[in-house]
C-alpha cells in the first residue's frame, strides 16, 4: 500500500532528516553573496581555491594541532565526492573494502558499482555499535585493500573511543592497508572533553590515509556542496586528475563561503553542540522502556539507531509506523544486511518534534 503523504502531510512527524536544522551562519552567507558580486562565479583551480586549501590547513592546525599542507588537500563536491573519488582511484575489481556495519548508505553500493567487494564487520547495539578491532583484523584477507571508518557514525551516532580508532589504524598498518576515515561529524561529539581526534593525528603515514570532511554538517551547508579529502601528495595527484575529468571543480562561491566558515567566528559551534546534546538526552530519556526497542547512548552526530524485536522487516516497520502512527523514520535496510530489524531516528529537529514523535512511537509499539 502506498502512503498518501499529501492527505496527511501536516500530521506527519519527521524524524528522518539527515541534515542540520540550524541556519547556515549569516557571515558565511554574506561571504558567498559577496563572492558572487565580485564575479567569483567561474571555474576555480581544479584542486580548489588556494586560500580555501590554506584555510583547511589552518582548520587542522587549530582543531587538531597538526600540520596539513595545501598540497595534501583536494577540494571536492562535498565529502561524498571525496569518498567516491578515492574508491574509484584506489579500489580495483575484486578488491575488498572492510566496512563497519551499520554503514553510511553510499559505501557498499558504490564499492559494488566499481567492481569491489564490501566486507562488513557487524557492530552490535549491545556494544553501542562500537567495533571490536580484533574482529576487523580477522576479516582481513589477501584481497583486502582498505578499511573505511566513520566515527561519529551515520546511522548509529556511535563515536568510537580514541583507543578503538588507534587500534583500527594499527590493524591497517600491520596489514599494509589503505585507511579511509569519514569525519563529517567530527565536531558533533557530546561526551568527549576537547576536540575529537581526526585519524590524521593517529596515523602519520598519509600515503595510506584518506580523511574525508566537508562543510555540510558543522556549518549547515549541505546544499552548497563543498568538502575535501586530505591525503599524501602522491595519492592527491591521482585524485586530482580524476576529479578534473569528472566534476572539474567544486562550487567556486561555496569555497569562498568556506573560507569564512573555517576562519571566521566559531562561537556558534559550542551552543549548537550543547543543543544537539540536550536533544540527544531528551530522545534517549523518551526511548527508555519503549516496548520492543533496544537502545544505547550514541556519542555524536544526530542519530539514534534502535533495534526492535518484532517479526517485521525494516521497510514494513517504517511504512506501518508512517501510516499508523504518522512518524517518518529511516528503515535500517540501506545500512547493511544486519540492519533489517532497526531504524534510524534523527534528532536534527526541535524538542517538541522529538517529544511528539517518540510519544507516537511509544503508543504505536505498545499495541504489538
Ligand atoms: C557519514 C556521512 N558521510 C558523508 C556524508 C555526505 O556529506 P557531504 O554533504 O559533505 O557530501 C554524509 C551525509 O549525510 C554522511 O552522513
Image (cartoon, helix red, strand yellow):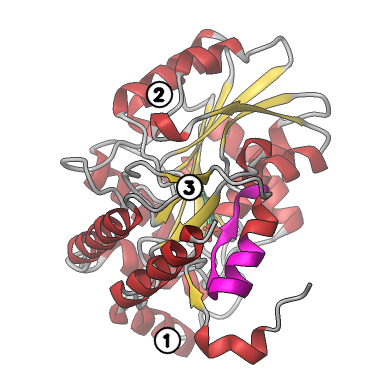
Label 1 packing within 10 angstroms: few (<14), some (14-19), many (20+):
some
Image quadrant occupied by the C terminus: bottom right
The residues tagged by marks 3 and 1 sit, at their Cα atoms, a distance apart of 50 Å
Quadrant hosting residue 360: bottom left
Q: Nearer the viewer, mark 3 or mark 1?
A: 3
Which of 54/265 is in front? Answer: 265
Residue for badge 3? 292
**Magenta segment:** 318-333
The residues tagged by marks 2 and 3 sit, at their Cα atoms, a distance apart of 41 Å
Residue for badge 2? 203
Label 3: state its secondary structure: loop
Image quadrant occupied by the N terminus: bottom right
Q: Nearer the viewer, mark 2 or mark 3?
A: 3
For residue 290, which numbered disc appears in the image?
none
- Residue 9: x and y in percent read 58, 87
Residue for badge 1? 33
Amino acid at each position: 500500500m502506498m502512503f498518501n503523504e499529501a492527505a496527511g502531510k501536516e500530521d506527519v512527524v519527521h524524524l528522518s532528516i539527515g541534515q542540520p536544522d540550524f541556519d547556515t551562519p549569516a557571515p558565511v552567507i554574506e561571504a558567498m553573496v559577496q563572492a558572487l558580486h565580485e564575479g567569483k562565479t567561474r571555474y576555480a583551480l581544479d584542486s580548489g581555491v588556494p586560500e580555501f586549501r590554506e584555510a583547511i590547513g589552518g582548520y587542522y592546525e587549530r582543531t587538531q594541532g597538526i600540520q596539513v599542507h595545501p598540497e595534501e588537500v583536494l577540494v571536492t563536491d562535498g565529502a561524498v565526492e571525496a569518498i567516491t573519488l578515492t574508491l574509484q582511484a584506489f579500489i580495483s575489481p575484486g578488491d575488498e573494502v572492510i566496512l563497519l556495519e551499520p554503514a553510511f548508505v553510499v559505501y557498499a553500493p558504490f564499492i559494488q558499482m566499481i567492481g569491489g567487494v564490501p566486507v562488513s564487520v557487524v557492530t552490535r547495539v549491545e556494544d553501542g555499535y562500537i567495533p571490536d578491532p580484533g574482529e576487523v583484523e580477522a576479516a582481513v584477507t589477501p584481497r583486502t585493500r582498505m578499511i573505511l571508518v566513520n566515527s561519529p557514525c551515520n546511522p548509529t551516532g556511535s563515536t568510537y573511543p580514541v583507543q578503538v580508532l588507534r587500534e583500527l589504524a594499527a590493524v591497517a598498518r600491520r596489514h599494509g592497508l589503505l585507511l579511509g576515515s569519514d569525519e563529517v561529524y567530527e565536531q558533533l561529539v557530546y561526551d568527549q572533553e576537547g576536540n575529537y581526534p581526526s585519524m590524521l593525528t593517529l596515523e602519520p603515514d598519509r600515503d595510506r590515509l584518506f580523511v574525508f570532511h566537508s562543510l555540510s554538517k558543522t556549518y549547515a551547508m549541505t546544499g552548497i556542496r563543498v568538502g575535501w579529502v586530505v591525503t599524501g601528495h602522491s595519492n592527491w595527484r591521482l585524485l586530482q586528475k580524476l576529479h578534473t575529468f569528472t566534476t572539474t571543480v567544486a562550487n567556486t562561491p561555496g569555497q569562498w563561503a568556506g573560507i569564512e566558515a573555517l576562519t571566521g567566528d566559531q562561537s556558534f559551534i559550542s551552543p549548537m553542540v550543547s543543543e544537539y546534546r540536550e536533544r540527544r538526552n531528551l530522545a534517549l530519556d523518551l526511548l527508555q522502556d519503549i516496548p520492543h526497542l533496544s537502545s544505547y547512548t550514541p556519542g555524536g552526530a544526530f542519530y539514534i539507531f534502535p533495534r526492535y524485536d518484532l517479526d517485521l522487516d525494516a521497510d514494513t516497520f517504517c511504512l506501518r509506523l508512517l501510516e499508523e502512527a504518522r512518524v517518518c523514520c529511516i528503515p535500517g535496510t540501506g545500512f547493511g544486511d544486519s540492519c533489517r530489524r532497526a531504524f534510524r531516528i534523527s534528532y536534527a529537529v526541535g524538542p517538541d518534534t522529538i517529544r511528539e514523535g517518540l510519544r507516537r512511537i511509544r503508543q504505536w509499539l505498545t499495541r504489538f
